[in-house]
Amino acid sequence: MTDQSQPSTTRRGFLKAGLATGGAIAAGGAAQAAQEPDPLITEIQPWAQGLGDGVDATPYGLPIEYESDVIRRNVEWLTADTISSINFTPIHALDGTITPQGCAFERHHSGAIELRKEDYRLMINGLVDRPLIFTYADLERFPRENRVYFCECAANSGMEWAGAQLNGAQFTHGMIHNMEYSGVPLRTLLEEAGVKPEGKWVYVEGADASSNGRSIPLEKAMDDVLVAFKANGEALRKEHGYPVRLVVPGWEGNMWVKWLRRVEVTTQAIESREETSKYTDTLADGTSRKWTWVMDAKSVITSPSPQSPVTHGPGPLVITGLAWSGRGAITRVDVSIDGGKTWQIARLAQEGQDKALSRFYLDINWDGSEMFLQSRAIDSTGYVQPTKTQLREVRGLNSIYHNNGIQTWWVNANGEAENVEIS
């Protein structure tokens, strides 16, 4: 691995020089202009001349108006109607790893429904000793767990298969969120019902009109799957399956059934619409791979990116992004500023967690020349995120799902960025 050479100016020296000239870095102008008194420092501002809002101004806290652009967005031409559509997490504007519920992407097949806790029922049936029905209050009485996991739509980055298309990390990689879920292991409920020896699969189904249903091998169901009723410490949002959803760590988001109403133990997969005609990987010869549930290691630089350009000019620059793997934890992320010719090891904000997002940073001194930014993730199994060319050599151009190829942002000398492809 070759390290990218760095300019001789150190970050500390650069910042000290900027402070000495009265903020020339931030102003981006001449030293003479920067040395003039700054009224934001020398004069008392309006916000310091009176009283602010009281504690009850917003009983449920909302973002300040200056962050009003940090919102989920959809792409209107993707679907005929938003009732069966998707919007995207503004990953370009977030930091850390936990996604606020209000920013976490939505995917609906027949719209988000309103279901009261008092009206909620969960049935366990099929090959069990005791078919059971649980109320919401029943679920709250079982021992619960708190786990942080990412949820990624299988179609995340799907529109990039044939080439660079959508100009923004929010749109290319924003079908993902990472939250702390609280709930009861599905294993606990299945053990309460008593799974018969011939049971090998479970079929999980939602309460919405689409009756979205997926088959899950019993081994996975008895492992780390959660029946969750809280996210990030509060009740699930309506759009995320309130009051109860399924959490299937590391596996494609379509299996995370919302408004969970039924878990049926079966001898074999049901092979429903969502696991046959949809959510399978079509190869170049027209055949399709099925049971490709796991979301392989993937990463993306969130800033700089098309929606998060460099605005401060040359000098210290923080390159940051997200990495994740459905097979384990992220152990390393490499970053290239020259389109993959050379790579540097990025700094992980913290040790990678199993099936959860990792935040990475690379701190450089940018000389103002164009960059071709890429990142590649390595997980605890040793898997290395592939290039798009490597994916296409195996799967052709017919795929929609499970695109985990390396993403490229072209950062121009003026700091603006575009979605391009360097295979």
Image (spheres, grey):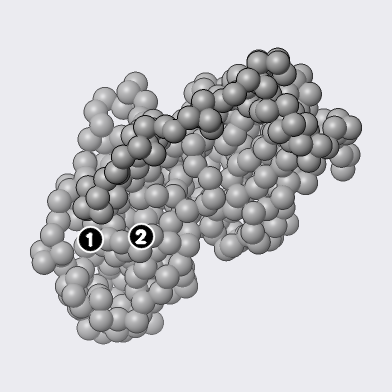
Which kind of residue does numbered mark 2 sit on? Ala
- Which mark is on residue 292? none
Who's the residue at 32% across and 23% down the image? 76
Q: Is residue 264 above or below residue 73?
A: below
Discs 2/1, front: 2
Which kind of residue does numbered mark 1 sit on? Pro
| Residue 206 in view (yes/no) | no
| Displayed quadrant of residue 49 | top left
Name which of mark 2 and mark 1 comes first in the sequence: 2
Q: Is residue 228 above or below residue 18?
A: below
Identify which residue, 177 or 68, lies in the foreground.
Answer: 68
List the residue tagged with mark 2: 231
Left or right? Give the position of 273 relative to 163. Answer: left
Q: Position of residue 149 (x, y in %)?
A: 48, 59
List the residue tagged with mark 1: 243
Who's the residue at 37% across and 68% down the image? 182
Identify which residue, 248 or 119, lies in the foreground.
Answer: 119
